[in-house]
Image (cartoon, grey):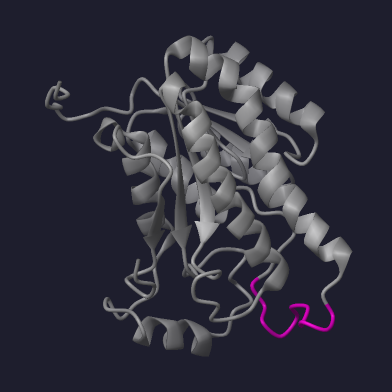
């Protein structure tokens, strides 16, 4: 049986949790959902002022909640407090938080310098934290009859313009989690996808990147420019919308065409 045609989808009935949602790419994602009418939990770790300033612009639909998503207890409290505030279940989770990382090619650990501690730190932030968050929101999504999980990845493990070994290894593992969780959670009506940008112009994490690197990347893209946080946020909204109801287990690359396929 063919699914019925969609009318213009709305995000107004979504309760969205954006981790690291107060600055950089996270802020662009939070604002995009708020502009589309959704209610948004703006999670922050150290950026309380930014989170509260963003939330104050949408007092009825935004709620700033501090939590270190590397701590499972704080993750559970984050979800409980957010759902109690809005009196509704979380229907969309965006795993965006990036822990203690700067895209500075000169300062990165080289192949002969990479340590187990550096790898472990990125895996806790980019793999274990998203898993804990997914598990925390699953009861609500199941009770609601479905949901959307959107993980933020990177194109660097497909095209390592700069070999950030620890960061790219963790994000590659997150892509695997995205695809295997999509299979497990599909019967519950939960779509799990990844959106992978390249270097974004500009976020706090990419502020240390020299202009020459941005320009070199831009020259290699069909669009001849570097992707912005707002452009990547557009794709996150697409995956949360009813237009993407048939999309799961996918990695959508948003980098101006730098990486093909």
What predominant SS class does the magenta segment belong to?
Answer: loop
- Total numbered badges shown on the rendered structure: 0
Relative depth, front residue between 162 and 204: 162
| Quadrant in which the N terminus is drawn | top left
Q: Position of residue 11 (x, y in %)?
A: 33, 28
**The magenta segment:** 103-113
Name the quadrant containing residue 188.
top left
Q: Residue at x 69, y 72 (%)?
A: 165
Give the left or right position of residue 174, taking residue 149 as reference.
right
Q: Position of residue 237 (x, y in %)?
A: 36, 41
Quick check: can you spot residue 122?
Answer: yes
Relative depth, front residue between 62 and 221: 221
Q: Residue at x 60, y 72 (%)?
A: 207
Q: Position of residue 155 (x, y in %)?
A: 49, 67
| Quadrant in which the C terminus is drawn | bottom left
Name the quadrant containing residue 112.
bottom right
Q: Residue at x 61, y 31 (%)?
A: 134
Q: Residue at x 49, y 76 (%)?
A: 159
Q: Is residue 235 part of the magenta span, yes or no?
A: no
Q: Is residue 260 above or below residue 134?
A: below
Quick check: can you spot residue 40?
Answer: no
Q: Position of residue 94 (x, y in %)?
A: 52, 39
Give the left or right position of residue 219, taking residue 50 as reference.
left
Q: Is residue 242 above or below residue 83?
A: below
Name the quadrant containing residue 253.
bottom left
């Amino acid at each position: 049986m063919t699914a019925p045609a969609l009318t213009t989808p709305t995000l107004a009935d979504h309760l969205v949790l954006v981790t690291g949602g107060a600055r950089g790419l996270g802020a662009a994602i939070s604002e995009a959902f708020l502009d589309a009418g959704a209610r948004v939990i703006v999670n922050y770790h150290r950026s309380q002022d930014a989170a509260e300033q963003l939330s104050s612009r949408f007092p009825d639909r935004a709620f700033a909640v501090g939590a270190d998503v590397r701590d499972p207890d704080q993750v559970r409290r984050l979800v409980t407090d957010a759902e109690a505030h809005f009196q509704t279940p979380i229907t969309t989770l965006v795993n965006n938080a990036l822990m203690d990382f700067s895209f500075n090619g000169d300062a990165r650990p080289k192949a002969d310098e990479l340590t187990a501690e550096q790898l472990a730190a990125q895996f806790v932030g980019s793999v274990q934290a998203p898993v804990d968050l997914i598990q925390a929101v699953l009861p609500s999504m199941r009770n609601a009859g479905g949901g959307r999980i959107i993980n933020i990845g990177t194109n660097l493990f497909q095209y390592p313009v700069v070999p950030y070994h620890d960061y790219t290894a963790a994000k590659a593992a997150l892509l695997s989690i995205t695809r295997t969780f999509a299979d497990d959670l599909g019967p519950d009506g939960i779509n799990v996808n990844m959106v992978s940008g390249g270097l974004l112009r500009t976020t706090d994490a990419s502020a240390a990147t020299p202009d020459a690197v941005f320009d070199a990347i831009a020259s290699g893209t069909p669009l001849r420019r570097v992707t912005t946080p707002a452009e990547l946020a557009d794709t996150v909204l697409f995956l949360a919308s009813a237009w993407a109801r048939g999309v799961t287990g996918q990695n959508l690359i948003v980098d101006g065409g730098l990486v093909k396929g």
